[in-house]
Image (spheres, grey):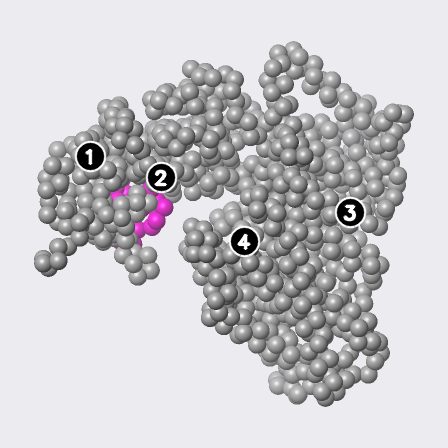
Amino acid sequence: MSEKLLELKNVTIKFGGVTALNEVNFHVNRGEICALIGPNGAGKTTVFNVVTGVYPLTSGEITFKGVNLAGLKRHQVTKSGLARTFQNVRLFGDMTALENVITATDVHKKTGLLRALIGTPLNRKEERESKERAHELLALMGIDHRADQLAKNLPYGDQRRLEIARALGTEPELLLLDEPAAGFNPAEKVELANLIKKIRDKGYTVLLIEHDMSLIMGISDRVAVLDFGQKIADDLPTVVQNDPRVIEAYLGVPADAS
Amino acid sequence: MNFSVITSQFWSLVLQGLALGLIYALVSLGYTMVYGVLRLINFANSEVFMIGTFATLYLEVHVLGYATNSPSLHGAKLVWTLVLVFIGSMIACALLAMLVEIVAYRRLRARGANRLASLISAIGVSIALLEGMRIITISRPMTTPRLLDKWSFGEFHGANFRIDTLMAIVVPIIIFVVLDRFVTKSRLGKSIRAVSMSEENSKLMGININRVITLTFCIGGLTTGAAAFIYTTVYENTVFNVGFNMGIAAFTAAVLGGIGNLRGAFYGGIALGMLEQFASAMLGSQWKAVTVFTVLVVVLLFKPNGLFGEAVQQTRT
Amino acid sequence: MANLTRFNLRDKGAEIWAGWSRPVRTVFVLAFIVLIGLMPFAASWGPTSFLNTPITSFQNVLVYPVGMFIMMALGLNIVVGKSGLLDLGYVAFFAIGAYSQGILSTLYGWNTWEVMPFGIGFAMLAGVILGLPALRLRGDYLAIITLGFGEIVRIVAINLSVTGGPNGIPGIPNPPSVFGLHFDLMHPETFFWLVFAMILLVIWMVRRFTIRRPGRAWEAIRQDEDVAALMGVNTLVYKLWSFVIGAAVGGAAGVLYASKVMVISPDMFKFDVSILILACVVFGGIGNIWGVVLGAGILAYMPERIRFISDARQLVFGLVLIIMMNMRPDGLLPRKKREKITEKGAK
């Protein structure tokens, strides 16, 4: 099939005595929408944290575009084409929506402090481009009318959309969405699903963590299931849906089984 | 650099370092306890210490009526006099520390102001106390009466086991043991630890946050007051700016040991006291501060949570 | 009362400013600069003579402490206000600048203008040496490490012979004349203009940074360092830059200070100065240039003005800090809170 954009090989994470991820093998193909599901505490967000360099690996290997991510700093991981959102929204609250996105677009800019001080033509050009790109992304997420409002004053739904816009600002090849629909009503969820498809159609690859099954089944090309830090299923949505192990993980072990 | 002093004065330096370090440890509790629950530097603690030394002086000279040339006391009278002054100094400092919390921190906390605002108001309190005392004492250093005759139990390889040196070691250790038991065993102590792990969750569990904060200031004040008494009894003098160096040293000790936890303050204080003694003996006392600073930076680079610290951050995210 | 504390002068000012056309703005700025330039003569002019300071002459007070404090507060604001790093030893960079001037001028005969780039350079170098290890650590530790560093620079100055030990360095020359302006004891107003020019330079620099990439990076770091890193901000490099630029401003102020007072000694660079500068920043309105300028102006001027209560002036200063912070924790002129309603959708 297509190219493996992100690949986790035998990834294990331990915090003290607790094993958060155990020998997880998992990959994301370029151009797909892949969902990562599992009961609470299964280790989904841990996957995001280890991929983006927040937690160090205990053992195993993570490659992105075939390159090992080990030893990269967090901002370098982002620069290489990975960006994420957060389960509990973490915007720069005292910046405007526009500034939030511009800050993310800065990652690929060349001019640093000195050229900003002198105001070289290149710096001016980059500043202008950043602003235009940021407006584009806000428009894509349907919140360009909020551009000049402080992030902390936005309605909750728009904050979540702004987080996606900000992540897209870093021009990622792989977008990691951590429960993007949390707290949304059904209508908003449908809208979000369409938005995620639109993002994929623009050429981004999407890996998302979600609890809402109907959302996932509707948009995902593939679904991986984590339970107690181990991958228990990884297949087409329709197949995973009927996998007895997945049902067991969600509903608990039946009393007469074992 | 003078290495021979290490061998010739080793035990003497250890003893002095221990005595000095445990005084630091007591004062550093005033920083570490407050930092544990508020995540703020209790900037005025150095002046709480200063007031403690003057409280000791005031009690001895003005309340109990001893002059600087009074003969030393003996027997039961010596014991109850010292105990009285000791408790008096502790109470004075505890009251002051709680007052500092009300004046400098409480209102700002209630308004959810930024951390620096509280820091500046605490600095304001600190300046006011310092300047107030400077004006009252006309900047003059003051001598305290020698109530405790400084007799020695004997020598061990050059280390002089004097009564006041031993007091400076034994009393803090007792205080730390008591406090450690209080924090780990008692209900109030547990609520302090709960708040320092998560203020939000503690609130949900029905813990009165304000009371816990007052309590931590109170405990920090008590131990700082104890340190002030010991310091004054050992060195027999004080001056309005005595708190400054003590404050820096105690804060350094807290960070060195691992700020936010009790045992960190204890070991950090001892480590700093030893370090200062050995550095002074080897390099000369003028380079003491430089050595301490360098060691602090190096330690933090390799052990970001201090020498003996459990990670504060891991418990609170 | 509640209205008064919520009233945000900066917002109001920004609103008016936004309404002006370019020529109006230019005229206003020029008029403002001229007005400030005339400040040294305010004490001898009837209507403003209440500004006069009783002990030291008003013109000298304008240079030090007022001008110098404003400059240093602006420098420290880059560190504390913009990127949220608590520096309790800012005086160290001031001292390094001052000692650069003291040593290079008395031993090698360099003049102030020749020393200036070196003074700034040494301060920046010190910033890098201190910042590289310190900025890797948890934010709270920076406070104690910078505090220690501030003390160490002073202790080193006391114990080295090249710095004149505890007595310091006497006989530092004033800057040579430029453009017919003489810098000496008789002309404190020219010193003021010099400091004023440097303050304007710093303000220009900070404003440039603030609206461009560095400002955004600092702001992101201040608000949430982890997220900033995950959004691709090289946090260590930007923190180091803010630290080093702050150091540069402190160093420049130090060079000027030494060539103004002509004698420097270690006790001029105590911990109190660091704290005072920090107080200026927070008191005025952390993160906001105009707030910082106002705060530094007031806190530097006030103790001089109330010298008649001479002994108690520091006490009053402490009390004012407590009361002010309790009333307006965000400072006199808080950081911007407004939301731009203008220029909607520039696309």
Q: Is residue A63 magenta?
A: yes
Report the amino acid beneath label 4: Leu
Foreground mark, 4 or 1, reads: 1
| Residues flagged by tags 2 and 4 on a common chain | no
Q: Which residue is mark 4?
A: B38
Q: Which residue is mark 1?
A: A214
Nearest the viewer among A74 and A123 is A74
Foreground mark, 2 or 1, reads: 1
Q: Considering the numbered disc 2 on the image, is that residue within a helix, a strand or a loop? A: loop
| Marks 4/1: CA–CA distance | 44 Å
Residue C18 visible, this angle: yes
| Marks 2/4: CA–CA distance | 26 Å
User: Which class describes the residues within 10 Å of circle 2: few (<14), some (14-19), or many (20+)?
Assistant: some
Rendered residue at 73%/44% (across/down):
C320
Q: Give left or right: position of B125 versus A114.
A: right
Report the amino acid beneath label 1: Ser
Rendered residue at 27%/48% (across/down):
A40
CB atoms at circles 3 and 2 under 8 Å apart?
no
Chain letter of the residue beneath label 1 in the structure image: A
Report the amino acid beneath label 2: Phe
User: Which class describes the residues within 10 Å of circle 1: few (<14), some (14-19), or many (20+)?
Assistant: few
Question: Magenta part of the protein: which range?
Answer: A50-72
Q: Which residue is mark 2?
A: A86
Q: Considering the numbered disc 4 on the image, is that residue within a helix, a strand or a loop? A: helix
Vertical placement of residue A126 versus B293, above or below: above
Vertical placement of residue A51 versus A126, above or below: below
